[in-house]
Image: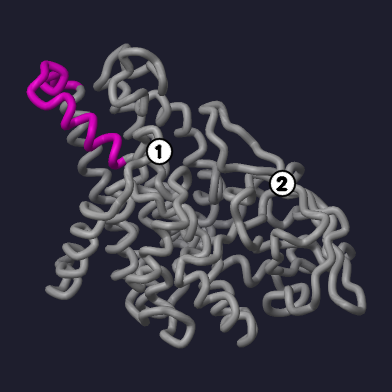
């Protein structure tokens, strides 16, 4: 198997790398990790939109460039390595746009996709609910059908960017009497619609990107329905694969590791044989994880939805992200436990921040035990447990 990129692909990587070196804004509070979660800049997203770097795999008719999934991977890898603030367009580019492209009406595609591609429209994705955990089939938010459209009632939780989003991509139950995996439907909802209340969820780092969202008799027209009524589970399955399969599940902590190694270059810490062994293992695992993501992109370019490939990639990548955080903290010693704002904290306390945030990696987007079940059942053909 030839792992080399073509000359054109290498040139594209250099172009992106030069762009971020010149135009990438400074990360807020000096934190460059998790740029797709904590880095939010409408201005930067619009700049990428002007360069045609959002929705680059989509048809040109909808604002895309008709480029390959591999080229999109090259782009996103370089952006995340640089800690670029890509949160404003990330969800729209990664999963909402492809979902609308696959299941939306022509009117919805024409109305929404060019605005996402231009970096002008911010989406949040409302899936999780307080009583459902990781079980999407347990969604209880209702979309009650009426003659003029639907009335939404319920609550969503852990909704990233809901306080900044223009639209919400919502999964709701349209047939409460149907079996668990049936009777779900998908909607695009304007966040300015009366009856929507957004409340912040501040994590233990003091950061706010999660929210809980309440829908209190929110009325939407029939044009808000995406795809077929009651077929939301089958439509969302592919969206989850795209959510799980990106390079963000592997190198969100790359800026931290790179900056820690630069800080410690030439010091006794990097001569410790135990830590050197851990660093070597991390390097091998990072390359393996990257290859899993590149394999997933090749699956997409081959015309298949990367179900098992996405599960393997996220499972290995997010557990690796946790090991990166632990290793950097070990490299920095006791000082690595000092959080942001603490006097004398190396790297501004980013190592401690990363350790505290690390448990989220193997929860958000699908827990590790769910991903192991997907690999076992759909990949290896094992019976359900």
Q: Quadrant of residue 358?
A: top left
Determine the residue located farthest toward the right in the rendered image. Answer: 147
SS of the residue at dot 1?
A: helix
Label 1: few (<14), some (14–19) or many (≥20) C-alpha neighbours in 10 Å: few
Q: Which of marks 1 and 2 is nearer the N terminus?
A: 1
Quadrant of residue 66 in the image?
bottom left
- Neighbor class of circle 2 (other Cα within 10 Å; few <14, some 14-19, many 20+) is some
* In the foreground, 165 or 170: 165
Is 348 positioned to the left or the right of 231 in the image?
Answer: left
Residue 89 locus on image (x, y percent): 48, 60
Q: What stretch is highlighted in magenta?
A: 254-274
Name the secondary structure under disc 2. Answer: strand
Q: Which residue carries the number 2 mark?
A: 198
Which residue shows up at 16% across the image and 67% down it? 10
Closest to the camera, between mark 1 and mark 2, is 1
Relative to residue 273, is residue 118 depicted above or below? below
Q: Estimate the x, y position of residue 329 in percent, counting from the top left.
A: 32, 23
The circle on residue 28 is 1
- Give the residue drawn at x 76%, y 66%: 184
- Choose between 327 and 67: the one closer to the eye: 67
| Distance from Cα at disc 1 to Cα at disc 2 | 23 Å
Residue 378 visible in rendering: no
**In the rendered image, the vertical position of residue 28 relative to residue 217, given as above or below:** above
Marks 1 and 2 close (CB-CB < 8 Å)? no
Q: Is residue 16 left or right of residue 145?
A: left
> Residue 301: horizontal and vertical position, in percent?
35, 76
Residue 15: x percent and y percent? 19, 65
Residue 265 is covered by the magenta coloring: yes
């Amino acid at each position: 198997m030839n792992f080399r990129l073509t000359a054109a692909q290498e040139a594209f990587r250099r172009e992106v790398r030069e762009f971020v070196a010149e135009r990438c804004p400074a990360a807020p509070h000096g934190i460059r990790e998790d740029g797709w979660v904590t880095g939010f800049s409408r201005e930067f997203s619009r700049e990428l939109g002007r360069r045609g770097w959002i929705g680059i795999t989509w048809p040109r008719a909808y604002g895309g460039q008709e480029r390959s999934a591999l080229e999109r991977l090259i782009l996103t890898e370089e952006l995340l390595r640089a800690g670029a603030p890509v949160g404003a367009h990330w969800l729209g580019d990664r999963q909402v746009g492809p979902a609308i492209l696959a299941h939306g009406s022509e009117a919805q595609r024409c109305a929404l996709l060019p605005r996402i591609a231009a970096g002008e429209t911010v989406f949040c994705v409302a899936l999780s609910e307080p009583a459902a955990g990781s079980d999407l089939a347990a969604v209880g938010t209702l979309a009650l059908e009426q003659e003029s459209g639907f009335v939404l009632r319920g609550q969503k939780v852990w909704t990233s960017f809901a306080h900044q989003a223009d639209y919400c991509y919502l999964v709701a139950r349209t047939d409460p009497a149907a079996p668990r995996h049936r009777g779900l439907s998908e909607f695009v909802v304007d966040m300015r619609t009366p009856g929507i209340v957004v409340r912040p969820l501040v994590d233990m780092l003091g950061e706010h990107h999660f929210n809980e969202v309440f829908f209190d008799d929110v009325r939407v027209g029939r044009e808000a329905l995406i795809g077929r009524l009651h077929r939301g589970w089958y439509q969302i399955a592919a969206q989850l694969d795209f959510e799980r399969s990106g390079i963000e599940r592997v190198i969100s902590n790359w800026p931290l590791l790179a900056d820690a190694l630069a800080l410690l270059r030439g010091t006794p810490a990097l001569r410790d044989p135990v830590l050197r062994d851990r660093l070597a293992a991390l390097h091998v695992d990072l390359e393996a994880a990257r290859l899993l993501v590149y394999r997933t992109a090749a699956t997409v370019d081959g015309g298949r939805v990367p179900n098992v490939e996405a599960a393997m990639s996220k499972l290995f990548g997010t557990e690796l992200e946790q090991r990166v955080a632990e290793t950097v903290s070990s490299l920095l010693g006791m000082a690595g436990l000092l959080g942001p704002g603490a006097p004398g904290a190396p790297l501004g306390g980013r190592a401690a921040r990363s350790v505290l945030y690390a448990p989220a990696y193997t929860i958000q987007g699908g827990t590790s035990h769910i991903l192991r079940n997907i690999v076992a059942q759909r990949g290896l053909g094992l019976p359900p447990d």
